[in-house]
Amino acid sequence: MRCYNLATARQNRSRVTVLMLDRQGLAQIPPEVWEMPGLETLDLRGNAIHALPDNFHELTSLKVLLLGDNQLKNLPQQMPDLVQIDLSNNRFSELQVAPGQLKHLQKLNIGSNRLKNLPDLPFPVLKELILEGNLLTRFYLTQAHYPKIEKLNLAKNRLSEFDIQGSFPHLHTLDLSRNKLKRLSDHFADIPFLRALHLSNNQISTLPHSLAQCVWLKELNLAKNGCSELPPYFATLERLEEINLEHNAFAQWPHLPAKLRKFKVARNHLTTVPESFFFQNKTLRSLDLSNNPLERLPGLSACAGLENLTLPKVCPPEIVAEVLKLPRPAILHGMTGSPLWKKLLPFAKACARKKIPESERLLLWEALEEKTNLSSLALPLLLKGIGLGIPALQQDLRQHLLKRRSPDFAIKNISTGSALALIGRMAQSRQDLKYRLEQKGFNLCSAAQALFWVLVNPPFPNKLPENSGITWLDETELEQLLGPEVPVFDAQEQKNLQQLLLHADPINVRLAAQLLSHNGVPPDMLPHLYLAWRWAKEEKLRRELRALLSRYWPSAHRNLLRARVQLTRDTPWEEVEKQLAAILAPLKI
């Protein structure tokens, strides 16, 4: 029976097998414990116990004793025949155990104490030994003392010596991290089935040749040492899947096995990665190359299985070109805060999402970086760039298309009977637009039949006819062309529309939007339409208002629609007017 408090245990003394009294402020073990003959597990962690009583050995059934996070300094001379004991986070400066005691102990945790040495006693069946966070300066792993050891944790000590004496066929995990080791014992052949070796935060510059015999090794952590190379035999360790070489002195690419899954080599001096690495490591899932002076990454896109990739925050164009080839840019991590990556990541993701061919991605990136002449880009590529949805690129490419027309072009000079074509998709229906155009004496035709092309919203056609003499218009100019020669709304009607737009009820806002959509938006109504859009909460209504704004908003000032502002209904009207005036000043309304 498992009990979580003393009151329940008192009522079931003969049935209790597990007693959990952790973190209950106990200064000593309750005497009732000795009245529980079947007690096998006793958890006293996180109390204030200073000592164990001399008759503790009378708990003859006890197998698991958890005493971590107390104030113990010594153990009694006689102990029960335990299988597991936790003495971590106490005040032991030495471990006094009588010969023959704890001979069946399989797990001993005495981490985070003050031990400087260990008793010269055998632990014939001990499988796990945790000595992390003590003051040990040397440790000799001897077969006579630990013949069955499977896991040994010596991290966070002061070890300058560690030696292997004997054969340890059961040992699979060895943690020597955070010590003062400069060299390792060359007897790793005596640990043939080692699977995990942790050596971080030492002063190791070379690894022993005997490590080549650890053919079952799966994980090696050598971070924060002084290594500049790995021995050639590392390429033969076929089961090695995870290597951490962060914060070392590697200037050349190390010898690596071909089936790595996770590789960290941040904070070194690498300038390139061999192209063969990405083609050969088909199993690679995570790669960290950050904080290296990388110049090239040939073949990066060949590693299709990558799930996490971390690169330096500053990269030359050669690496940017490789990043743009990635089929899944979402694998990139860890570069937040860098101006380059703030721009590159959204762009690369958009290119992958829109399935832009690799050959065109670099051209569009150079356009975004303003490092190419936009006139050299083909029209379909310009439209693809606009369709990516990157605001800065959209604005530049739209303006470039509009600037292609004659310098003396004016909307009023478009003659009656002219044919216009839509390039893209408008919010209003094609039938409504065709009717409005016909009312003004214009025709809505296909791109092949028209000389006036109206650039609206994506998606755009993949191919357009190569007509000469094309004049581009934007959606705002189209509305100017279709607008009434005299105002549709008089002063009172405009005032009523303004009130409807700013009304709290979305039904009134939608009514005003419909009237403006059918009859046009006077320039002095744009501030109220802008405010209605900012205040709208319904997503569908927001989209409708945004589409209406886009039709009448001057294309040269589209960036104002992306400005981050704090205008809520709770804001005093004087402050609203002040902010609106500042935001819309370039429109000169």
Image: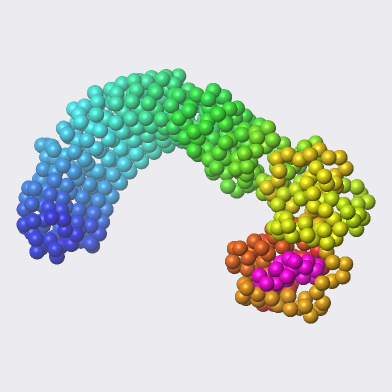
Where does the image place residue 198, in percent across and percent down from the top left?
37, 34
Q: Quadrant of residue 11?
A: bottom left
Inspect this view and state whether residue 310 appears: no
Q: At 63% from the left edge and 30% from the top edge, which residue is drawn?
A: 295
Q: In this rendering, would 168 be left or right of 527? A: left
> Which range is magenta?
509-530
Q: What is the total number of numbered labels drawn onto the structure image?
A: 0
Asked where in the image residue 260 lies, by quadrant, the reply is top left
Decide: is 21 above or below 354: below
Q: Give coordinates of residue 125: x percent, y percent.
A: 17, 34
The N terminus - image quarter: bottom left
User: Residue 572 or 112: which is nearer the viewer?
Assistant: 572
**Extreme-bottom residue of the structure:** 492
Instruction: Examine the rendered structure and indicate whether residue 132 appears above or below residue 20.
Output: above
Whole-percent x, y for residue 444 in the image? 80, 52
**Res 288 visible:** yes
Vertical placement of residue 25 versus 381, above or below: below
Residue 201: image x %, image y %? 42, 37
Q: Where is residue 154, by image quadrant?
A: top left
Q: What kind of secondary structure does the magenta stretch mostly adopt?
A: helix
Quadrant containing the C terminus is bottom right
Q: Foreground residue, 261 or 111?
A: 261
Residue at 24 percent of width and 23 percent of height: 167
- Taking depth in this image into account, of 556 and 147 the one nearest to the observer is 556
